[in-house]
Image (cartoon, rainbow, N blue to C red):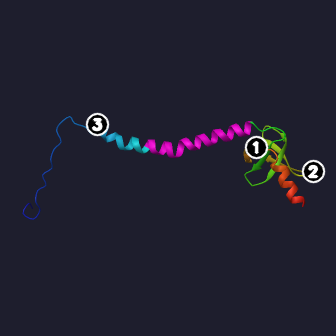
Amino acid sequence: MSFFISDAAAQAAPAGTSPGIEGLLFPLAILAFFYFLFIRPQAKKAKEQKQMLSALSKGTEVVTSGGVLGKVIEVDENFVKLEVSENSFVYVQRHAISSMMPKGTYKTVSKKIKK
């Protein structure tokens, strides 16, 4: 059979050698890349959201994840009562609040709507 197919001669590695630290360098670099690109920013954003929700108080102006602008009237363990216009109230879950607005935003927007 060796007449048609030449015999392959593999070079044997010296006994007792292993890839060492060089073999782990590339996978560790990939893990570090994913940590700094995805995991760390996500955890930082979650921490900021948690701090914002714990700072909610009566009179704070917020925007919900659905885009509703309102002024906080009551704060409960799980729900927040928002005034969205004069004598119109909406209850939303705490985690549905996406951002806090600067003071006066609610008044400015409500004046524009009245005109």
What amino acid does circle 3 point to? Gly
Q: Which residue is mark 3?
A: 20
**Dot placed on the residue nearer the N-terminal end, 3 or 1:** 3
Rounded to the nearest angstrom, the CA distance separating label 2 from label 3 is: 71 Å
Going from N to C along the chain, the mark reached first, 1 or 2, is 2
Work out which residue is located at the far bottom of the displayed protein and give it. 4
Q: Which residue is mark 2?
A: 87
- Comparing labels 1 and 2, the label whose residue is closer to the camera: 2
Is residue 85 magenta-colored?
Answer: no
Tell me what residue is drawn at x 71 percent, y 39 percent. 52
Earlier-in-chain disc, 2 versus 3: 3
In the picture of the structure, the residue carrying the numbered disc 1 is 94
- Hey, what amino acid is under mark 2? Asn
Apparent side of residue 34 relative to residue 15 in the rendered image (left or right): right
Secondary element at tag 3: loop
- Which residues are the magenta region? 31-54
Residue name at image x 73 percent, y 39 percent: 53
